[in-house]
Image (tube, grey):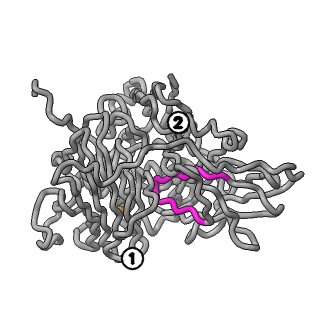
Amino acid sequence: MLDQILDVRFTTVTVPGYGPVTTRTYNGTIPGPTLRVRGGDVLRLTQINGLPPNPPHRGGHNTPHHANSFNLHTHGMHVSPSGHADNVLRAFAPRTAAQAAAGAAEPRYLTVVDVPVGHPAGTYWYHPHLHGSTAEQIAGGMAGVIVVEGDIDEVPEIKAAADIIVCINELKLKDGEVPAFTSGSWMTDVPSVFTVNGTVNPTITLRPGEVQRWRVVAATAFTALQLTIAHDHGHLPVLQIAQDGVAFTEPVTLTEIDLAMGNRADILVRGGEPGSYTLRATGVPGPLMTVRVTGEPLDPPMTLPTSLPPGRPFLDERDIAHPDADREVVFHADPGVFPGAFPNAFRMLGTHATPPADPDGDLTHDPAYGLFDPGYANHTLRLGTVERWTVRSDETMPAFNHPFHLHTNQLLLTHRNGRRLDPPVWHDTIGLTGGTPGRSATFLVAYEDFTGHALAHCHQLHHEDLGMMQNVTYVQDPPPAAE
Ligand SMILES: [Cu+2]
């Protein structure tokens, strides 16, 4: 059992390299505390909402609202989406103005997550996920890392390596505050400030020959990260051992790590030639982190693993049992079609759009079509079945990456743009870069263990708040006789 209080309120945090920031935090820090569990554990989080009352909201549910209410998502974990677990349909409201004036206690909300025995050991994260307030809260640093410990940690070369969290947060700051998300220009008008473990460009050191294990977390809401560790002579190669919390069957050597918003990569980094290196992301000015290789070389140098535990078994197309097992999602943005402060429509179309309507119709005259409707069931998914989804982006704007994220079950990415990946790779979030309409990702997914209501959405989280989201319902198959 891990019992942890997450206290949420406005706090002034000193962000080294930036200065004081007044923002909503977990326990007064950016990121929030790291939570470590193992398969079979219970993760029990008591969340205190010490935020001020929500101002009244006059717009629809697909415009930002209730920035002082939240909930909790255990991103990537295969756990129940129901009840008091990873249930993102709950709302943890603050005191009302009347309650605050009367001195009522700050409300407490409990999240209890049973981590299944055999849950993949790896790197996950938590963040609030209330529709309408997610982007503003994550832009203020409400995010933290969950480590599931287990078999991969016992590989001798990994066990010998220092276990280091590299949590990359993307803050949206003006004068030390996150401005309220009150118009569509918020994204472009408010600059992003990137921190690693709460500091702008911290320094990490390793000795020549030393191997460290970095758990790199893209706890970002807006920007995909193409990461390199650069120095004068090129890039320091790294060994990736896991993606999105699931270990690879064998390590893969890379010079660039692609992380869409929400992705994680576990990597092994070995100190080489002494000197100063920088962890950088393409398109992000300035380094995210400075890496200094310094000190006495380790003799002999630490070794890198050549094999890993079996990992999560792959699915294949022969596991697809029923004829209607193909689903398609199309991310489609219509800029400038709505009156008011949020003129862009961020839609999810495809085979299960909201509500079902003519996909060739004039979307710009139908403000609802393809936007999130909390009362509409987009996908009914039967436990024990395997399906294939193809996710496509119609996006012409290079800046609009629409990462696809499904809750509760992990996705086996088998194809990119119709080309098979060998081997396929487990993900929970799949980036789809903009600029080339028609880009696609195909994955297989098995619906396992948990019934309940969950979500599929774009992980560019202001798109999600504006309606780029669908409902999924996991149900028993066949339905129990009593129903
Ligand atoms: Cu999007």
The boundaries of the magenta stretch are 256-268
On screen, residue 45 above or below 403: above
Residue under numbered circle 2: 148
Q: Residues within 10 Å of mark 2 (few under 14, many from 20)?
A: many
SS assignment at label 1: loop
Residue under numbered circle 1: 435
Earlier sequence position, callout 1 versus callout 2: 2
Q: Position of residue 92 (x, y in %)?
A: 36, 35
Q: CA distance from mark 1 to mark 2?
A: 36 Å
Q: Position of residue 472 (x, y in %)?
A: 24, 46
Between tags 1 and 2, which lies in front? 2
Q: Residue at x 25, y 52 (%)?
A: 470
Amino acid residing under circle 1: Gly
Q: Are marks 1 and 2 in contact (CB under 8 Å)?
A: no
Total numbered labels placed on residues in the image: 2
Front position in the image: 464 or 352: 352
107 in the magenta segment:
no
